[in-house]
Amino acid sequence: MKTFNRIVIYICGLLTLALGIVLNTKANLGVSPIISVPYSIAVIWGQNLGAVTAGFYILFVIGQLVILRKRFRPVQFLQIPLSIIFGVLINFFGELITIGGKDLPTDLVLLVLGIFFTGLGAALTMMMNILPNAADGIVQAVSQRTGKKLGAVKNILDASCVAVAAAISMAATGRIIGIGLGTVLAAVGVGRVIALVNRLYQKKLPAQAARFKLDAAPQKPPVKL
């Protein structure tokens, strides 16, 4: 696969990922674990979700630098502008999509679509093997440093994000914000979508993309958000 095609697919994956996250939040049934902290902060203090998400992801990049130290490659700093772009995309889709939170059937449809697009976007961006988003990057960094399996590290990160979001919302408002059925379904469903996409395309896209691998950190199979 040509480098240009890989970049196009990567950008499409990034757009799809942002769309999926926004659909998940619009369902108002509980957001994805990885976005739960920015979402709770944005709701409680009336901040811009995209900006808070970008800041949260930049903290993940700093975390990678601390964890990997000399093994942190300069190209990984590109995750910072990528995080900002991702935040802009979240704001764009957030303004574009106005439905949700009105009735349960609509919310359930939004949730299912959100889970599907989140998984599809995550799979496409990771399969192109260009640059992981900061959330995937911190998982990979911890896995490399500790030797623990990627899935186990991701589960710990998800649980930690949910716990922090719950603590912040309880301390600030006395109630849980952004965590619910959708959070649980997203934690399970996104990974299943990623696995499905991998099975459908692993013989074509990843094999071709590997021929044009950039000088980035070694990539693991995509992880759910």
Image: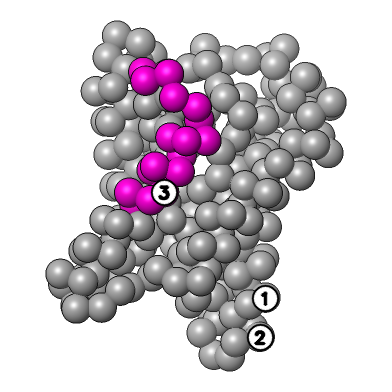
For disc 3, the neighbor class at 10 Å (few under 14, some 14 to 19, many from 20) is many
Is 93 magenta? The answer is no
Question: Predominant secondary structure in magenta?
Answer: helix
Give the SS element for disc 1: helix
Horizontal and vertical percent position of residue 204: 84, 26
Above or below, comparing residue 38 to residue 149 in the picture: below
Q: Amino acid at mark 3?
A: Asp
- In magenta, the rendered stretch is 144-161
**Residue 26 in sight here:** no
Residue occupying image coordinates x 28% and y 31%: 63
Mark 2–mark 3 CB contact (< 8 Å): no
Give the side of residue 50 with respect to residue 3, left or right: left
Residue indicated by mark 1:
109
Query: Where is residue 50, by image quadrant?
Result: bottom left
Q: Amino acid at mark 1?
A: Val
For disc 2, the neighbor class at 10 Å (few under 14, some 14 to 19, many from 20) is few
Above or below, comparing residue 42 to residue 134 in the picture: below
Give the SS element for disc 3: helix
Above or below, comparing residue 7 to residue 23 in the picture: above
Mark 1–mark 2 CB contact (< 8 Å): yes
Residue indicated by mark 3:
158
In front of the other: 156 or 103: 156
**Residue 190 in sight here:** yes
